[in-house]
Amino acid sequence: MRTAGRAPLLAGSALAPVLVLALALAATACTADPPKQQPVEVRTDTASLAKCVTLPGRADSVHWTYRALGATDSRVPGPTDHALDGIARLADGEAARLHGSGTWTPADASHLPPAELTALLDHPVGSWLRTEALDDESSSSEPHFLLDPGTGTLYFWAINPHCAD
């Protein structure tokens, strides 16, 4: 009787490594690699940008990005937030005109241009200035503007901007 009682125990212990291996394979087979982050396209077309942002001054050149924030995995339910960031090289005299048109104060460093855009600057930015006349801090979807009058550079951004179709 004793040997009969031990047989199921031995059979169960022999299956334990097989069971652990099967569970490990099942667990790794169910997890997919997260989607790879695509490089952000830096755009220069002003017609598409004008659907989302009206710049407060004439620009000689504009570089901007539009990207999904957070996880861009289509399997995640719910809305996806988007960020628009851009840098404009203002036309001659425009930075001085803007700077003279309002009260400008130093901007805090909480929102700076993304690396894709700062890499395109041919000069270091001295300091960003903001004015309440152009920067409604209560709304993230409205465009925000920072100015560096010394270099004639305007940085702008919006979260979920209202873009015309």
Image: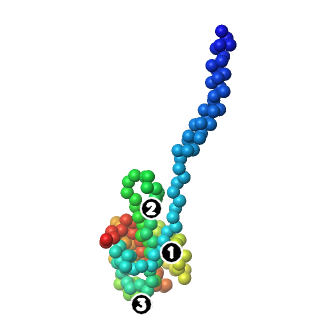
Q: Which residue is mark 3?
A: 93
Circle 3: element type: loop
Out of 34 and 131, give the one closest to the viewer.
34
In the displayed structure, 17 sits above or below 152; it is above
Circle 2: element type: loop
Dot in front, 3 or 1: 1
* Whole-percent x, y for residue 71 in the image: 47, 57
* Whole-percent x, y for residue 29 in the image: 55, 44
Out of 78 and 85, give the one closest to the viewer.
78
Where on the picture, by quarter, is residue 165?
Answer: bottom left
Upstream in the sequence, badge 2 or badge 3?
2
* Whole-percent x, y for residue 78 in the image: 38, 54
Q: Which residue is drawn at the image coordinates 53% and 44% (left, top)? A: 30
In the displayed structure, 1 sits above or below 122; it is above
Q: Could you tell me the amino acid type at mark 1? A: Leu
Q: Which mark is residue 61?
A: none
Q: Which residue is drawn at the image coordinates 48% and 85% (left, top)? A: 150
Q: Is residue 85 left or right of residue 11?
A: left
Q: Could you tell me the amino acid type at mark 3? A: Gly
Upstream in the sequence, badge 2 or badge 1?
2
Asked if marks 2 and 3 touch (Cβ < 8 Å), the reply is no
